[in-house]
Amino acid sequence: MNQIYSKSAFVLSQVFAKKGTVKGLSLNLPNVPSDRKKQIFAIVTETLKNKTIIDEIINSVGIFKSKGKQFRKKYPMILILIYEFLIGNEKSKNNQKNNSKKRRIRKFKFSEKDPLHKHLFSFRTQIVSQFARLKIKENSKSSGETKSNQELESIFRYARINILKCNKEDAIQHFISENFHFIENIEKEKPFGDDNKGFYLDFDVPNLFVFASGTDLHQDTFVINGSIILQDKASCFPALALNPSVSDDVIDACAAPGNKTFQIYELMKQFPNNSGKLFAFDLDFQRTELLRKRLNVFGAKNVIAQNEDFLKVNPNDPLFSSVKKILVDPSCSGTGIIANQNIFESANEERIKSLASFQKKILLHALSFKNVERVVYSTCSITIEENEGVVDSVLKEDFVQNSFHLENIFPKWKRRGLNGFVSCIRCSFEDKTNGFFVASFVRNLSQKKSNKKRKKKIQSNENLD
């Protein structure tokens, strides 16, 4: 169990550092059996759900006071251990009562040999007492809050067909063989049928299946071999907005873990004679390795995946002279992700400000590429500062104001940008997706013509030489 707790603490620390989602990080742990990955995912998910109450216990009991200061760096592990001590054990007991088959149920005990365990064990009575008081307080909350939590848990599950490995008919037959049933005529009240095992094709995103909330496909054979890609509907919009054509070179500026990168690759490969290159950048080495691994599983060849800071890429490098489309999906607060709701109940104002500054910088860098014709900006944040605020600030820059305009994307999508930015789109939990924002900057037609004239002039001068 110690390995499970240490791996769980590692995943939790990576989530706090915005290195990925709980699901993605847990299921991509190297050298960990799949059943252990599920356990780790469950522990981290439940710990995050109870983070607010555990933090209150830590502060009120004084875990970090006096001798406890030395354990501050082990905060993720402390969250995991307190969760297991207070709630994990209780769940294990309930599981054992409700389980007709006799099987070993994990039971948490503090270790007498581990200094951190010994420190927490010395507070066990206070921890239990404080937990009991907080639970009484929590039970007195309004029913409106409970309804809100239920709404958050009701987003649908999405699975996109990898058209390079699988066709629509084979994908449908596969899921039918896995005891799901394909629905063509959808009933509004029961879109997934009486048994919640129905699935259907999305109306907005091509080749995207929609499943009922809570459907878990991570161990599905088509998902494992890359024929099906688990990707939230909202996350599919940026690549569709980018809309690469037959000869475009394309950059994905912040590419890992790779779902959007591969979707761009698919869109490029829909043209039989496609000659465009796809450059994918990511600053983090491990995430770049994960990107390469996933692209290989998905069947993407010749994607130029580079472990490099996009901000340090020279826009005037001849290597990128044919780049016409750039996707900028930078680090953000993640306030739109369902799994993060307990972490981001109140987004830190200073952090949001810092992120927005970085987002503006990287978006301006993308727009500075000489021959770029479209730059799509997206985040999985729901804050105005990181979305409409960044777009507004970028549009006020002289070179952007003179050369680009916002394109009206997905006109049939009802949820538009706020503060008058109706050319942009937002996605919300109410749309049965994660929260998302997408904007598309397109070079003005007159600017495109002047760029072509300049290019011809350069070529002409080269010929004279």
Image: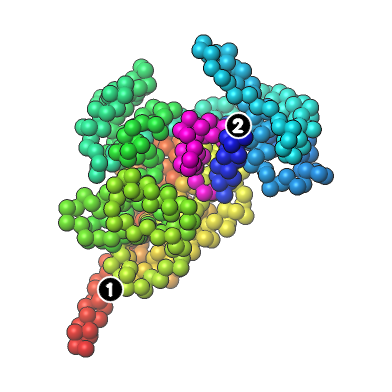
Give the mark toward the camera: 2 or 1: 2
What residue appears at the point 25 percent right and 81 percent down from the top-left corner? 458
Secondary structure mostly taken by the magenta-highlighted segment of the chain? helix
**Residue pushed farthest top?**
100
The answer to whether marks 2 and 1 mark residues whose Cβ atoms lie closer than 8 Å is no
Residue carrying label 2 = 1
Going 35% across and 51% down the picture, which residue do you hit?
261
Q: Amino acid at mark 2?
A: Met
Q: Position of residue 455 (x, y in %)?
A: 25, 76
Question: Pointer 2: residues within 10 angstroms few (<14), some, or many (20+)?
Answer: few
Per the image, is 315 magenta?
no
Residue 271 picture location, percent across and down:
19, 53
How was the colour assigned to the protein in this rendering?
A: rainbow
Q: Does dot 1 land on a helix, a strand or a loop? A: helix
Q: Is residue 420 above or below residue 79?
A: below
Residue drawn at 23 percent across, 35 percent down: 168
Highlighted magenta segment, given as a residue range: 18-45
- Is residue 26 magenta-colored? yes
For residue 451, which numbered disc appears in the image? 1
Residue 3: image quadrant is top right
